[in-house]
Image: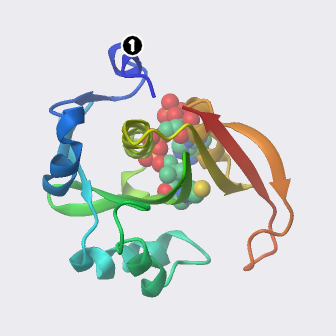
Amino acid sequence: MDASLNERNEIPFIWTDFRVQDYKRQLEQGIRFRLKDDKDFCVRNIGKNDIDTISRIEKSVFSDPWTEMIIKTYLEDDYYFLAFLGQISNEVVSYSFCRMILDELHIDNLAVRKEYRRLGLGTIMVWMLLKVAKIRDVNRAYLEVRISNGSAISLYEKFGFRKVGVRPRYYADNNEDAFLMTKEL
Ligand SMILES: CC(C)(COP(=O)(O)OP(=O)(O)OC[C@H]1O[C@@H](n2cnc3c(N)ncnc32)[C@H](O)[C@@H]1OP(=O)(O)O)[C@@H](O)C(=O)NCCC(=O)NCCS
């Protein structure tokens, strides 16, 4: 991931205080971004106390929401999993869950609450994931996305993800196909 994206103003935030050598501690405490409308957006690690909130948002966003059990799995080991949430004024408004397998990042879940969309939060979440993955020597990122999910596809394409295949009937709730998308970091 290229920090110059920020300098070229291609992402809608100012990155206030992130230091690569200190990223673990900063993710515990929260990394702050300033949105275009001057609101503060803070990204931090998800903790056990966040599970209820995320589970509620998950049910409001997805037709096949993750169970609390699945969410808990992603909190068990911060070497293999990245689990970030984003908040505005202490309100959880977004989250993402990834696995890191050898030199690959798998983005398994990403959501922004409906009332907070189109503010650049999805962009910040993906940017943050790719940034941390790069620090962790990841070489490529993968994800699956519903073929009907134009918003998410467009978000990922903005980061240079390309569609490289289709996984037929990937989603059990309606048998929808998934695009497999990937990006070299
Ligand atoms: C996909 C999602 C995470 C995007 O979050 P967001 O905070 O609204 O995204 P951003 O504001 O950062 O938008 C970034 C880009 O995404 C694309 N995008 C986002 N919403 C869009 C929409 N409704 N229509 C078309 N493109 C859209 C655009 O390319 C946008 O760039 P632009 O604003 O310069 O046009 C959000 O819509 C969401 O949570 N959807 C439901 C869950 C989901 O689909 N998750 C992805 C699973 S793979």
Asked if residue 147 can be seen in this view, the reply is no
Residue 20 placement, left or right of 125: left
Asked if residue 137 can be seen in this view, the reply is yes
Residue 125: x %, y % from top left = 39, 46
Name the residue nearer the viewer: 77 or 91: 77
The count of marks equals 1
Quadrant hosting residue 57: bottom left
Q: Residue at x 34, y 63 (%)?
A: 78
- Disc 1, SS: loop
Name the residue nearer the viewer: 92 or 99: 99
Residue density around tag 1, few if under 14, some if 14–19, many if 20 or more, within 10 Å:
few
Q: Residue at x 56, y 71 (%)?
A: 62
The quadrant of the image that shows the C terminus is: top right
Residue 136: x %, y % from top left = 40, 42
Residue 155 placement, left or right of 32: right
Residue 171 placement, left or right of 18: right
Residue 75: x %, y % from top left = 35, 72
Q: Residue at x 41, y 20 (%)?
A: 5
Q: Residue furthest right?
A: 168
Quadrant hosting residue 10: top left
Q: Residue furthest top?
A: 8
State the residue position of label 1. 8
Quadrant hosting residue 181: top right
Name the residue nearer the viewer: 115 or 120: 120
